[in-house]
Image: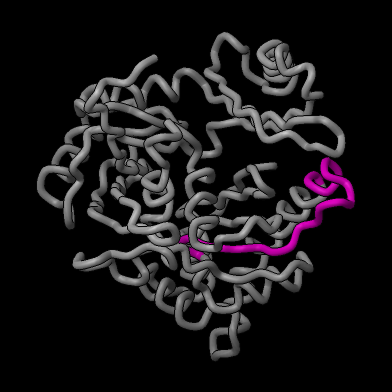
Amino acid sequence: MKLPLFYRQQPVFGFDLGYNSIKAMQIEPDNKTTSRVTGYAYTTFDPKAINDGVIVDPETVAKEAFDMVSKHVVGRLNTKRVAAAIPIAQAYNRVLTMPAEKLEDVKVAVQVEVQQYIPIPIEDLYYDFDIGSLNDKDGEVEVLIMASPKRVIDSYVQLFELLGLELAALETSISSSTRLVMHAEGSDLPTLIIDFGSVTTDLSIYDTTLRVTGTVKGGGDTITEAVAKNLKVTKHQAHIIKTKHGLHPSKYQKKMQAAITPLLDSLAAEIKKMIRFYQERTGKERTLEQVIILGGGANMPGMTDFLTDHIRVPTRMCNPWLNLDFGDLQPPHQLEKTLYATAAGLALIKPEDL
């Protein structure tokens, strides 16, 4: 198809719809390594508007979103094209390996894979795939398959129709966070990424592409509630104690360990399962090199040490904003920046890739 003479690829802004909040951000490339944030915004809504990943009250969400982009943007959002994310709990992904000479049959192979491994009737799913690069050693290619229930996707489409926005891309939240981390890291080392949300924690293993993704119950707010209950303090006080002391030596250490360790033990067990699954699929040629954590629970003192000790892989906290410049904009508070990780990852999608 020939492009119009004055065709210009339009940018997108990232739209992250969370448990009870909306985050938006627009980013433009600055040079080869850095990008510039041109605008961002945040608002909240009644969590009853979403049920099991489906936007059941799109009018309520649309009202708050419209108010946000109309009145509360720091900087500017100057495009109507939007990239959005769905929770990883509402998506399925698999990596299919097939001979390069059989690629003409890829659509059939993907359909068989979806029918065989995803526990939802195929007629109730939207699914897509992305073909990776050729492995010259064995002549095979990897095909990344993503799928999500139609009822979830359709509710997002309805929301953006109400807002008068063009939905240019829809992906999982962990895909967005992974893109942001890789933008900051500038590395293709096999990496486990842990993104702490409010009530769930998303996991992904990135090794030139997303190999494995998953989600586990419990996040930053879950830890805060456990601390509040064990120490018999308010949630606000528990949040301060958690972020200031965590698992490090303090007068709260024993009670903090009693409150937090069961949650972290459960998380570590799920991480080990994911690592084993990855190693079984890749063999000994590629091994996990590092663990990077981000999100609301990542900055708790002692978190990286705990995970390093329990999963035996070097763990560190990521600064996802390393190669992002806020320019003349007043940036969010350091503790609030983590709220925008998914929105920023979405905003980094290149228009030419859509």
Task: Give the residue displayed 55% in from the left and 37% down from the top.
Answer: 89
Q: Is residue 315 left or right of residue 42?
A: right
Magenta stretch encompasses residue 287: yes
Position of 280 with respect to 184 (left or right) is right
Residue sitting at the far right: 284
- Viewer-proximal residue among 343 and 198: 343
- Near-viewer residue (173 or 353): 353
Front-most of residues 66 and 300: 66
Residue 146: image quadrant is top right
**Is residue 196 shown to the viewer in this render?**
no
Relative height, residue 247 to residue 154 (above, below): below
**Does the magenta segment cover residue 71?**
no
Going by the picture, which residue comes out furthest to the left? 71
- Residue 274 in the image, given as x and y percentages of width and height: 74, 48
Q: Is residue 258 above or below residue 64?
A: below
- The percent coordinates of residue 21 (x first, y second) are 31, 47
Question: Is residue 353 in sight in this rendering?
Answer: yes
Q: Residue at x 72, y 18 (%)?
A: 103
- Please tell me which residue is depicted at 36% across the width and 27% down the height of the picture: 156
**For the C terminus, which image quadrant?**
top left
Q: Is residue 267 above or below residue 58?
A: below
Residue 268: x and y, percent? 71, 60
Report the magenta residues as a range.
Answer: 277-297
Q: Nearer the viewer, residue 317 or 88?
A: 317
Q: Position of residue 181 (x, y in %)?
A: 52, 57
Q: In the rendered view of the protein, which quadrant contains the N terminus? A: top left
Left or right placement of residue 335 versus residue 303 in this view: left
